[in-house]
Amino acid sequence: MINVNAHAVFSPEGPFKPTTIERRELGPLDVLIEIKYAGICHSDIHCARGEWGPVSYPLVPGHEIAGIVAQVGSEVVKHATGDRVGVGCMVDSCRECDSCHKGEEQYCLRGNTGTYGAIDRYGQYTQGGYSTHIVVTEDFVVRIPDNMELDAAAPLLCAGITTFSPLRHWGAALGKKVAVVGFGGLGHMAVKLAHAMGAEVTVLSQTEKKKEDGLRLGADHYYATGHPETFQALAGSFDLIINTVSAKIEISAYLSLLALDGTLVNVGAPPEPMSVDVFSLIGHRRSFAGSMIGGIRETQEMLDFCAEHGIAPEIEVIAASQIDEAWERVLASDVRYRFVIDISTMGS
Ligand code: NAP
Ligand code: ZN
Ligand code: ZN
């Protein structure tokens, strides 16, 4: 076993404390990554606080990982020592089921292995990227393009792919009207990506506080959902709505903003169920859908797309000692637009 430094929570309430965790010795297909940066995703908070169900502690969250390959196993062919690489929300899957064969490992029929909080095929409890090193099988490691900064690459491994995948799947492109609900980590990536794909983009945020940013980052329009007239003004407008909100919202009100045959895709993952007024669907043949991250091949495509279009998240780099404070700010929707932990502040 390899002992590495990490920051973990020891209970749902936290706080974070420095600790050491064990990584497995390198198998023939494993890659040892020296983590340089780890993004803070709202899912880290939902999960660590037990909102999605019980988890074991200590828990080291973090599934937006960017770093450098420090060592490779004897049979590794995809990555070499010194390569700039990333790891997202999963570190393995069964590789045998229909979903895995389609390259949609996130929908593995036996369940993908989460980067943290899961039991892997070796029977070990997985621990995430708020740590100095991680060992991952080569197929679940992606290449970070040369012209991309490592700190800015980190959030793409979850926020980037989670918005890229549904935008692609539901055909965001020139001539399509796309709305993004919630302008946080995922939301701001959805805006940048949809804009780069050629769509006409509208931000639907609770307030007008971030309007200037929204328009600067690629939105054509920006509305506050706190104003009831927004829903009247935009009724029947959009081909696609991506809901990135981390809390339960009145989903039927948003469904009424879809045009004929429009789709609202939920990527936000609040723990509470949301109810749908079926009349908001049947009147205009609308769909209500969900989407979870993206497969490994698509994650690489997304990184290459971002490199080609010069797309990077807006980040605030913090020290490991500031994780608790950053989490509070995420919960208060006070993040512009992704916190990224500088792992060098964790000791080596
Ligand atoms: P985030 O940075 O906190 O952004 C969420 C945004 O939702 C906030 O910035 C805020 O936007 C809006 N919001 C928050 N509370 C709200 C409320 N009570 N009512 C209305 N709007 C509210 O979070 P994130 O990291 O982007 O993650 C967003 C959600 O996606 C989380 O639930 C996360 O677990 C989930 N997620 C899912 C996947 C997947 O694979 N499906 C992957 C990653 C994350 P405004 O200030 O603009 O209103
Ligand atoms: Zn995430
Ligand atoms: Zn599978």
Image (cartoon, rainbow, N blue to C red):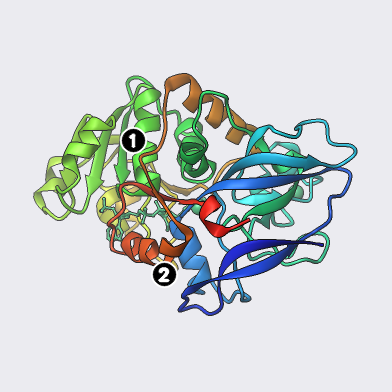
Q: Residue at x 70, y 42 (%)?
A: 140
Alpha carbons under labels 1 and 2: distance apart: 26 Å
The image quarter containing residue 60 is: bottom right
Q: Is residue 66 left or right of residue 95?
A: left
Residue type of the residue flagged with mark 1:
Val
Ligand 1 lies in quarter: bottom left
Q: Residue at x 75, y 34 (%)?
A: 81
Q: Circle 2 is placed at which residue position? A: 272
The image quarter containing residue 71 is: top right
Front in this rendered view, residue 46 or 234: 46
Q: Is residue 62 left or right of residue 274?
A: right
Front in this rendered view, residue 92 or 179: 92
Q: Residues within 10 Å of mark 1 (few under 14, many from 20)?
A: many
Labels 1 and 2: the sequence-earlier one: 1
| Residue 234 coordinates in the image, percent (x, y) | 18, 40
| Quarter the N terminus occupies | bottom right
Whether residue 262 can be seen here:
no
Q: Is residue 217 left or right of residue 316?
A: left
Of labels 1 and 2, the one closer to you: 1
Residue most extreme to the front: 347
Residue type of the residue flagged with mark 2:
Glu
Q: Circle 1 is placed at which residue position? A: 191
Callout 1–callout 2 Cβ contact below 8 Å: no
Q: Residue at x 52, y 67 (%)?
A: 47
Q: Residues within 10 Å of mark 2 (few under 14, many from 20)?
A: few
Whether the residue carrying mark 2 lies under 8 Å from ligand 1 is answered with no
| Residue 251 coordinates in the image, percent (x, y) | 31, 56
